[in-house]
Image: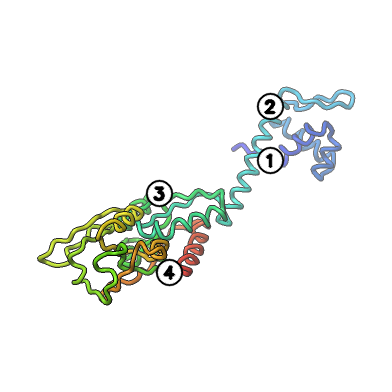
């Protein structure tokens, strides 16, 4: 196997740059005889002459020009590798793929993405947005490293390890002026006449009454639909905080609403080494969810 000493390449470049063996040796912090032996060893290995020495002038031979050009590229690549691996060790470089459901993508991903990119601008962040069961295939084939979802969904995934991240509140949301708005202590039965909006197709709420619905996995579109119709929407108040403050959306007081929060976990394949960036992501996600009202 061919091995080339990076130190020897630095010696060659130092002589080419300074035009002097003594100055090059001083730059490299070695004796002149040691530097001369290093370059002679390279010349002997490839049966070439790198420098012409004429009356104190040192110039590159054609072989020397080739060696210098290649040495520059190799040392630059080595420096880039060293920097990349150092950053990777700290979670600042490489690739991380994460999968999230539609609600969590809307609530968590904007803040999480900004924090990751500000802290690690060289990190490549790839996201997949689908229900947790659909993300399992991407997890297995390595397209993503982790799935972030609620506990119930992640419990259905085989062969994974789970880490708790936090929780988000859930509430029933309607447009301002909705017929049910302003009524205290509603029940699910009171809401039966109204259509529902959500990311998954809902079951019928009563055996005799069909349930109207608008199903879409884009929460921004769902928000627009709810603001202009009588749809009911079980979502996180965090996602619609601006609309709640502005009074364009209202929270309903539903006595038998379940669940009223979602526990958020992160799942990774069992016995698979996690990237340092994933550790950073977990810490950031926990911090964001802890701050979620």
Q: CA distance from mark 4 to mark 3?
A: 25 Å
Tell me the SS state at disc 2: helix
Tell me the SS state at disc 3: loop
Q: Nearer the viewer, residue 17 or 179?
A: 179
Residue 229, picture quadrant: bottom left
Q: CA distance from mark 3 to mark 1?
A: 37 Å
Pinpoint residue 292: horizontal percent, then vertical percent. Answer: 45, 68
Q: Residues within 10 Å of mark 4 (few under 14, many from 20)?
A: some
Q: CA distance from mark 2 to mark 4?
A: 58 Å
Q: Residue furthest left?
A: 208
Residue under label 2, please give it: 66
Label placed on residue 166: 4
Q: CA distance from mark 1 to mark 2?
A: 16 Å
The answer to whether residue 178 of the structure is visible from this angle is: yes
Q: Nearer the viewer, residue 78 or 196?
A: 196
Pinpoint residue 157: horizontal percent, then vertical percent. Answer: 32, 61
Q: Residues within 10 Å of mark 3 (few under 14, many from 20)?
A: some
- Quadrant location of the C terminus? bottom left
Q: CA distance from mark 2 to mark 3?
A: 41 Å
In the picture, measured across the screen, residue 283 lies left or right of residue 77, that is left
Instruction: Say if 38 sits above or below 56 in the image.
Output: below
In the picture, measured across the screen, residue 103 lies left or right of residue 178, that is right
Residue under label 1, please give it: 5
Label placed on residue 143: 3
Mark 2 touches mark 4? (CB < 8 Å): no
């Amino acid at each position: 196997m061919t091995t080339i000493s990076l130190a020897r390449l630095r010696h060659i470049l130092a002589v080419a740059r300074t035009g002097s063996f003594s100055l090059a040796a001083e730059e490299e912090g070695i004796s002149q005889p040691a530097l001369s032996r290093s370059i002679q060893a390279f010349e002997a290995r490839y049966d070439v002459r790198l420098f012409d020495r004429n009356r104190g002038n040192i110039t590159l031979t054609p072989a020397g020009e080739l060696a210098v050009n290649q040495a520059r590229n190799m040392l630059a690549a080595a420096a880039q590798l060293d920097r990349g691996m150092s950053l990777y060790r700290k979670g600042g470089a490489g690739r991380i793929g994460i999968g999230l459901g539609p609600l969590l993508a809307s609530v968590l991903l904007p803040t999480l993405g900004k924090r990751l990119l500000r802290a690690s601008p060289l990190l490549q962040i790839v996201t997949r947005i689908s229900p947790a069961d659909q993300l399992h295939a991407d997890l297995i084939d390595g397209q993503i490293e982790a799935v972030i979802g609620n506990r119930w969904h992640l419990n259905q995934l085989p062969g994974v390890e789970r880490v708790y991240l936090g929780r988000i509140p859930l509430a029933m949301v309607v447009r301002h002026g909705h017929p049910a708005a302003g009524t205290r202590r509603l029940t699910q039965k009171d809401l039966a006449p109204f259509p529902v909006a959500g990311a998954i197709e809902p079951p019928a709420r009563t055996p005799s009454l069909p349930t109207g619905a608008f199903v879409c996995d884009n929460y921004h579109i769902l928000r627009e639909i709810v603001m202009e119709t009588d749809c009911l929407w079980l979502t996180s108040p965090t996602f619609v905080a601006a609309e709640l403050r502005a009074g364009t959306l209202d929270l309903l007081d539903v006595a038998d609403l379940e669940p009223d929060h979602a526990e958020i976990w992160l799942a990774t394949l069992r016995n698979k080494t996690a990237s340092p960036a994933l550790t950073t992501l977990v810490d950031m996600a926990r911090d964001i969810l802890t701050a979620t009202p």
